[in-house]
Amino acid sequence: GWTESGPIDLGYHNSVLKRIEAKYRTPSNSAIFFFYKIGNDSREIQDREWEPFIPGSPMPFDRKGRFLHVRMELYPDGKSEISPRLSDLTVVYDKNMPPPPPSYITALPGDGGITLRWSSVPDPNLEGYLIYYGSRPGVYDGNESIMGPSPIRVEKSTNITLNGLTNGKLYYFAVSSYDAGGDPLSGLFSQEVSARPSRLYRNERKEDK
């Protein structure tokens, strides 16, 4: 017979698969053959061929991904009387990590909008930032800004003005970082900040001019 694992989530794209260990017994001349697939998209993995591996042996250095599938094919002895025994599988890997979030963020209210500013992230893999917003603490499901629904993707800029917001309404914001690995939504959030746009700031703009 055979058995397959569901997708094993290694936490973040391009995590490095080091080895897969197994505890098993193959009495008489029974046998177990081991196979795996790995990739960043669990749906795309379905169409790939299974690659064989020897439990405990180092994987090739380029075996990277977020989702791992494992398959075991089990064969009895020649008389079909004695079966192999598999009791445990252990995945050893180095989890890749997204860029850290900005360490500082501030929200400046205006008339019908809010300007966010944050510190740059000194990570060589940084590709940009995601701006999350909403009207409840920790719930970033906003869709009012003319910039688009939450999250809003920006490149390496460290500020953005979200116009089209409702005056008098309190909004909450957080920023995360992303790299080129294709998994931007796994980044950690910055601290949360809040601000309330108001028509009061309209006069301030005129005075500035």
Image (cartoon, rainbow, N blue to C red):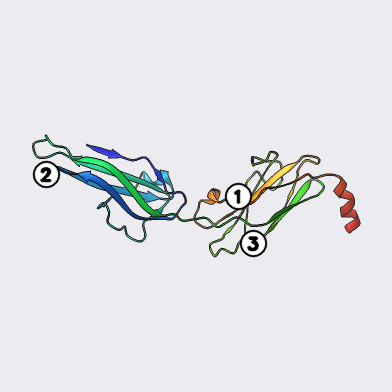
The residue lying toward the viewer, choosing from 126 and 83, is: 83
User: Secondary structure under badge 3?
Assistant: loop
Q: Residue furthest left?
A: 79
Check disc 3: other Cα within 10 Å, few if <14, some if 14-19, many if 20+: some
Task: Name which residue type carries label 2.
Answer: Asn
Residue 140 spot, x, y in % from top left = 64, 42
**Residue placed under numbered mark 3 in the picture:** 120
Q: Quadrant of the C terminus?
A: bottom right
**Residue placed under numbered mark 2 in the picture:** 29
Left or right: 99, with 89 as reference point:
right
Residue shown at the point (81%, 49%) measured from the top left: 110
Q: Quadrant of residue 198?
A: top right
The residue lying toward the viewer, choosing from 52 and 30, is: 30
1 and 3 marks in contact (CB < 8 Å): no
Task: Name which residue type carries label 1.
Answer: Phe
2 and 3 marks in contact (CB < 8 Å): no
Residue 79 spot, x, y in % from top left = 8, 36
Residue shown at the point (27%, 54%) measured from the top left: 56
Q: Which mark is residue 189?
A: 1
Task: Name which residue type carries label 3.
Answer: Ser
Left or right: 175, with 200 as reference point:
left
Q: CA distance from mark 2 to mark 3?
A: 61 Å
Left or right: 154, with 209 as reference point:
left
Residue 141 spot, x, y in % from top left = 64, 40
Q: Quadrant of the N terminus?
A: top left
